[in-house]
Image: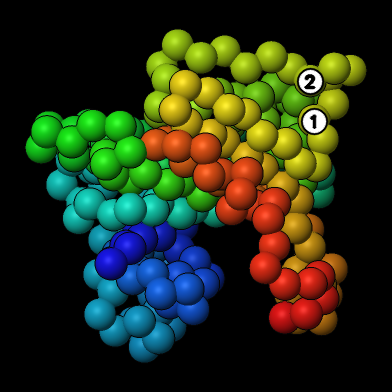
C-alpha cells in the first residue's frame, strides 16, 4: 500500500488524484474551515492534522509521498512579488522541514537509501516562481528540495539565467524533475498553467513520473 500526506490541502486535489491511482491519503494539513468540511465528506478516513507551522515530521504518521501546493501569492506575477521571503509563499520551507524530520525519524528505524520514507516529494505552484527574485527563488526551491537527499548540493543557475519550463537534476541516488502543465489538457475548461515538481529521494524515477506518458495529450 502506497500512502500520501497532503500539505496546504485545500479541498483535497492531491488526495483525489491519489485515490484515482491506488494511493491512500492518510492525512491532510489545512486551516480553512470550509475546505476541511469538504474533504471530511470526500475522504472520511483521512486524518486532519491542522496548521502546518505546528506540525512535526517526527510525530506525523509516516507516508511514502508528501505533496503540497504552498501559497502562491508572493510568487505570482499578479502579486507584489515578495517571493519566498514573503509570509505566505515562504511556507514552502515548512514542507521541506516536515519532510526532513519524517525521513530522519524513519531512518532511526534502521532503514537506508530507497527504503526511507517519504521517498517521494511533490510541489505545485505558479510559473511566476521561475522569475521570482530574478530566478533565485526557483533555484532555492530546487536546492532545498535536493538537500533533503544531499545536504551539500549546489545547483547553478541555467545558461542565460532563465529557468526553462521543464528540467531535471540527477544526483547521487536521487532525482528532481519539474514541468509546467496546463489544466486545459486534463479535461478542465480553462487554461491554468502550474509548475509540478517531483523528487525521488531514493532513485531516478522523477523524470519518468513527469515526462513519460501512458496516454495522448487531451485524452483525459
Q: Residue at x 47, y 41 (%)?
A: 200
Farthest residue to the right: give it.
160
Farthest residue to the left: give it.
109
Q: Which mark is residue 70?
A: none
Q: Residue at x 36, y 88 (%)?
A: 41
Depth check, front residue: 42 or 166? 166
Farthest residue to the bottom: give it.
41
- Residue 102 makes an appearance in the image: yes
Quarter-wise, where is residue 39 in the image?
Answer: bottom left
Color scheme of the displayed model? rainbow
Q: Residues within 10 Å of mark 1 (few under 14, many from 20)?
A: some
Helix, strand or loop status at disc 2: loop
- Residue 74 makes an appearance in the image: no
Q: Residues within 10 Å of mark 2 (few under 14, many from 20)?
A: few
Q: Residue at x 76, y 46 (%)?
A: 127
Depth check, front residue: 147 or 72? 147
Q: Residue at x 72, y 72 (%)?
A: 215
Q: What residue is disc 1 on?
A: 163
Residue 21 vertical placement versus 8 (above, below)? below
Residue 170 x %, y %? 58, 27
Report whether 99 appears left or right of 72: left
In primary-sequence order, the first of circles 2 and 1 is 2
Task: Please report contact status of discs 2 and 1: CB closer than 8 Å, yes or no.
Answer: yes
Rendered-image quadrant of the C terminus: bottom right
Rendered-image quadrant of the N terminus: bottom left
Report whether 58 appears left or right of 74: left
Residue 183 vertical placement versus 78 (above, below)? below
Helix, strand or loop status at disc 1: loop
Q: What residue is disc 2 on?
A: 158
Report whether 183 appears left or right of 121: right
Quarter-wise, where is residue 129 in the image?
Answer: top right
Residue 49 vertical placement versus 34 (above, below)? above
Amino acid at each position: 500500500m502506497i500512502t500520501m500526506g497532503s500539505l496546504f490541502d485545500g479541498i483535497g486535489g492531491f488526495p483525489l488524484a491519489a485515490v484515482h491511482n491506488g494511493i491512500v491519503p492518510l492525512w491532510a494539513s489545512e486551516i480553512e474551515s470550509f475546505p476541511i468540511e469538504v474533504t471530511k465528506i470526500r475522504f472520511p478516513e483521512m486524518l486532519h492534522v491542522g496548521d502546518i507551522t505546528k506540525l512535526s515530521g517526527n510525530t506525523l504518521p509516516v507516508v511514502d509521498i508528501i505533496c503540497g501546493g504552498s501559497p502562491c501569492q508572493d510568487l505570482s506575477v499578479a502579486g507584489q512579488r515578495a517571493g519566498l521571503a514573503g509570509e505566505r509563499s515562504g511556507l514552502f520551507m515548512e514542507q521541506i522541514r516536515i519532510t526532513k524530520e519524517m525521513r530522519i525519524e524513519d531512518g532511526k528505524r534502521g532503514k537506508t537509501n530507497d527504503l526511507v520514507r517519504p521517498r517521494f516529494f511533490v510541489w505545485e505552484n505558479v510559473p511566476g516562481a521561475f522569475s521570482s527574485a530574478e530566478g533565485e527563488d526557483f533555484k532555492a526551491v530546487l536546492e532545498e528540495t535536493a538537500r533533503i537527499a544531499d545536504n551539500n548540493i549546489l545547483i547553478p543557475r541555467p545558461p542565460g539565467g532563465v529557468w526553462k519550463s521543464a528540467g531535471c537534476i540527477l544526483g547521487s541516488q536521487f532525482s528532481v524533475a519539474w514541468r509546467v502543465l496546463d489544466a486545459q489538457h486534463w479535461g478542465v475548461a480553462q487554461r491554468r498553467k502550474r509548475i509540478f515538481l517531483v523528487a525521488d529521494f531514493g532513485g531516478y524515477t522523477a523524470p519518468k513520473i513527469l515526462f513519460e506518458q501512458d496516454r495522448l495529450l487531451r485524452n483525459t
